[in-house]
Image (cartoon, helix red, strand yellow):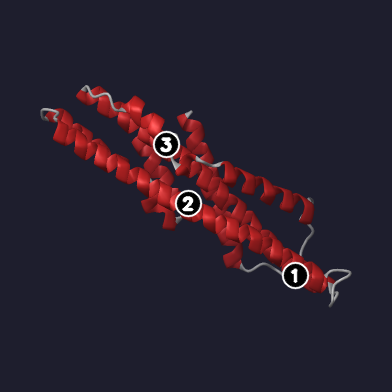
Amino acid sequence: MKFGKTLRRLIQETLPEWRDKFLSYKDLKKLVRLIAMTQPCSTAEAKFIYLVNGEIDKFNTFFEEQEEEFIIRQKEFQERIKEVIETYGLTGSQPNEEHYAAAMAGIEMDIVNFHGEMVLLKNYSNINCTGLSKILKKYDKRTGGLLRLAFIEYILKQPFLTTDQISELVKECESTIDSVFPAPRQEQPERRDEASVVAEQGILRNVVAAVETMQELQ
């Protein structure tokens, strides 16, 4: 499947609020075609470079905002878990097995969704890097330019590809899930509402779609 179609499918299946944060591949492809049809010149190349830099800025801004939000949410999860244990746990101020189980079930659902969002962000970085590489390759091929190599060196240094912090947060999240919510999961005393179940399944579908897309591109 061509990259453009693969990207469109991924965008359709991702979180709605993320859809305008991906590479504007179709617009860049149209510009490359237009430049190739006319006589390539420095002005046309400058416009293409300007648009590519705008896309990179978009990726960096979105990635850094999400990363900052994830750091805050990770701390909030730890505080929520601690509060439940200190309140409803066996040695808590108000020991209550039923309340403890219900509260932990809610946290578990939220933290699993949170883990999924972080995985999506890592895939977001990869798919957009791949897209930039492909559009630059297309530009060089269609126009005879020599942008790709220099641009790739620049792109690889950008914040949106600096995923070490996110990878660490993913590991911490997985460690929390394993230690606080060990498998097999126990049946909870209170039924989860339908909206919560749908939300969790939605995140899972998004993650699966993103992973499958990256596998197709490898």
Q: At which x and y percent is residue 185?
A: 77, 55
In-front residue for pair 71/14? 71
Amino acid type at circle 2 is Glu
Q: Which mark is residue 64?
A: 2
Q: CA distance from mark 3 to mark 2?
A: 16 Å
Disc 3 marks a residue whose amino acid type is Cys
- Residue 83: image tag: 1
Whether label 3 touches label 1, CB < 8 Å:
no
Front label number (1 vs 2): 2
Farthest residue to the left: give it.
39
| In the rendered image, the vertical position of residue 156 relative to residue 63, given as above or below | above
Q: Nearer the viewer, residue 211 or 27?
A: 27
Left or right of residue 30, residue 98 in this image: right
Q: Quadrant of residue 23?
A: top left
Q: In the image, 78: left or right of 73?
A: right
**Residue 72 image offset from top left, x and y in percent:** 59, 60
Residue denoted by label 3: 129
Whichever of callouts 3 and 2 sits on the residue coming sooner in the sequence is: 2
